[in-house]
Image (tube, rainbow, N blue to C red):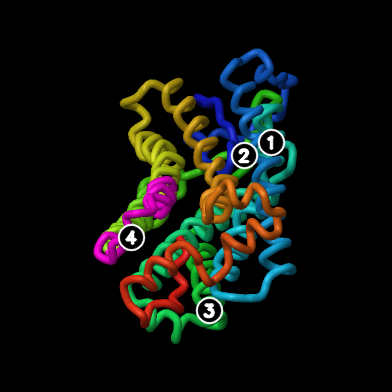
Amino acid sequence: MDYLDDYSYPYDYNYSLELNDTPLELPVFTHKSTCSMEVLCVCLLVVSVVIFLLGFCGNALVIWISGFKMKRTVNTTWYLSLAISDFVFCAFLPFSITNMAMEEWIFGRFMCKFASSVMFLNMFSSIFLLVVISVDRCVSVVFPVWAQNHRTVNKASIIVVFSWVFAIALSFPSAIFREVHTHMGRTICFNNYTWDQYSHKTVAVSRFLAGFIMPFVIIIFCYSIIILKLRTNRMTKSSKPFKVMTALVAAFFVCWLPYHVFVLLELNQQNYDHNILITGLKVGASLAAANSFLNPVLYVFMGNDFKQKFKNSVLSKMENAMGDEGRTTSRYLSRSSSMDTRASTHI
């Protein structure tokens, strides 16, 4: 059998193995990790640890403030749900970091399936919540009066539940196809797509469409509408909304595109160099994981003027950024229409 260098990097974006009917062999050799001698592996380890620390602490801070220190509003519901999703993902990163360093899976078959499923659950839930936030911002800007009268915490909570249910459904393939195998003293957690000849392609394409293309198109559409609306209402005196929107779209695109590209290339792995695919999947996975700590930065800390927030306490900074009454945009909206003065359009 041709065993590939299989790693479980953030999520389960590892190279898939093709197993035949050869019986499982008892370990004969003692596996020794060579990660410490590889520059790329060491760099990705450092990056993963940084992502874990920043993402874990940053999202925990968002959860603490939005969940326990602020009044429950539609905006805090979005931010709390997004932070919980990213926090859980970061909480499971140590499994991937350990596996990356040891180049071996030591946590058993159940955790192989469970950790992977939970990470994909949070991948999809995080992406879907980003889409929800984008749509909510678009509706608030285009229909401020309607949004003021119909945006409720209960409705927001229902939308969040549906987002998580949809994410759970899309995370099931990890529990189904994830397996553990021991060969030559090395235990690996890998994707076993040998059940059906189309299973690998079905999973990869569905994740690409539901986890990137559709969300990205919706986000681009929403922020395009917002920009047009802001220009129509002569709000171009402040460049802050445009900078924030550009950062949001760019971060989403940069973090997720490389991973999806190499996952699709893996479908025809015989046509590409094995080392290039492995390297691309590793780097792409790390970039995708970075989105989990960029979210609180982009959606919270960039919400208001940085210099002003820097002078305030952390609580005040996040309350200003996450509050329903967005000062900057609502102030501009009030100039264009007296009916829009109460609109919550903080971007």
Task: Report the residue at 73% width, 68% height from top.
Answer: 69
Q: Which residue is drawn at the image coordinates 55% and 67% (left, top)? A: 78
Q: Is residue 281 above or below residue 313?
A: above
Residues at circles 2 and 1 in contact by the CB criterion of under 8 Å: yes
C-alpha distance separating marks 3 and 1: 38 Å
Using a 10 Å C-alpha cutoff, classify the residue at mark 1 as few (fewer than 14 neighbours), some (14 to 19) or many (20 or more).
many
| Badge nearest the viewer, 1 or 4 | 4
Would residue 272 appear left or right of 30 to someone viewing this image? left
Left or right of residue 251, residue 94 in this image: right
Earlier-in-chain disc, 3 versus 1: 1
- The label on residue 158 is 3
Q: Residues within 10 Å of mark 3 (few under 14, many from 20)?
A: few
Q: Residue furthest bottom?
A: 149
Residue 294 vs 85, above or below: the answer is above
Mark 1 sits on what residue? Answer: 105
Residue located farthest toward the top when viewing the structure as drawn? 37
Closest to the observer, 53 or 115? 53
Question: Which span is picked out in magenta?
Answer: 229-247
Disc sitting over residue 48 in the figure: none
Q: Earlier in the sequence, mark 1 or mark 4?
A: 1
